[in-house]
Amino acid sequence: MTRLLITGLLGLALSGCGFKLAGTASLPPELSQIYLVTSDFSERQRKALSQRLSQAGARVYSQPAAQAVQLRASLKTLPDRRLVTSASNGKIVERLVRSLDFSLQGADGNLLAPAKTLIQQKDIVLDDDNLLSSAVERSSVIEDLEEALFNQLIFQLIRI
C-alpha cells in the first residue's frame, strides 16, 4: 500500500513539473492535420513516418484535405563511405548517411517552413567473412537512421 502511494505521488510530482517521456512531444494545434506528400519513400518508410506523426498528435492524410497543412518529405541515401578495411581480420568500417528534405505549407497555401535538410549518419563495422550478419546489421542501422530522421523532423515541426 505504501509503495502504491509513493508511486502515485511521484507520478503526480513528475507530471506537475512538466516531465514527459522521450518521444512523446506534441505538435502544435495548427499541425493537427497533415497531408503527407512523400517521394523516394518505401511503403514501410511512409508508414513509419505517418505513425510517428500520429504519435505526436497529428491526423495524417494521404490525399489533400481541407484545413490540413501539406508536409513534403523526401528521403535520400547518400553514398556509403568505406573508412577502414582490415586485411588481417576481414573487418570493414563504413559510414552510412541518410538525409530527409522537408518543407511545410499551410492549408491556405502559405509557406510555414522553407525547404530544409536533416542528416543522420552512423559508422558501422562489417565482417567480410559473415555477409549475412553484415546485411542484417546494415539493415538495422538504416532503420535506426530513418527513425532518428523522423524524430528530428517532429522536433523541427514542434518549433514552427
Image (spheres, rainbow, N blue to C red):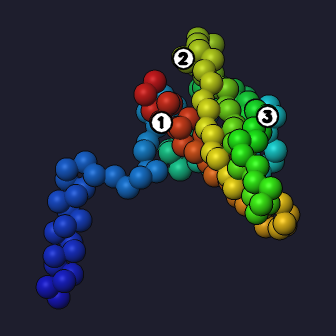
Give the image location of residue 44, x and y in percent. 77, 51
What is the three-letter code of the residue carrying label 3?
A: Pro
Q: Residue furthest top?
A: 110
The residue at which mark 3 appears reads as: 79
* Residue found at the far bottom of this picture: 1
- Please report whichever mark, 1 or 2, sits nearer to the chain's N-terminal start: 2
**In this view, the mark in front (1 or 2):** 1
Position of 123 relative to 153 (above/below): below
Mark nearest the camera among 3 and 2 is: 3
**Is residue 33 or residue 100 the one in the foreground?**
100
- Up the image or down, 51 lies above or below 150; here it is below
Give the residue pinned by disc 1.
Answer: 155
- Marks counted in the figure total 3
Neighbour class for label 1 at 10 Å: few (<14), some, many (≥20)? some
Residue 61 location (% of width, % of height): 69, 38
Q: Secondary structure at mark 3?
A: strand
Q: Is residue 32 left or right of residue 146?
A: left
Q: Secondary structure at mark 2?
A: strand
Per the image, the residue denoted by label 2 is: 112
- Structural distance between the alpha carbons of marks 3 and 2: 31 Å
Instruction: Kindly tell me whether residue 92 is visible in this rendering.
Output: yes
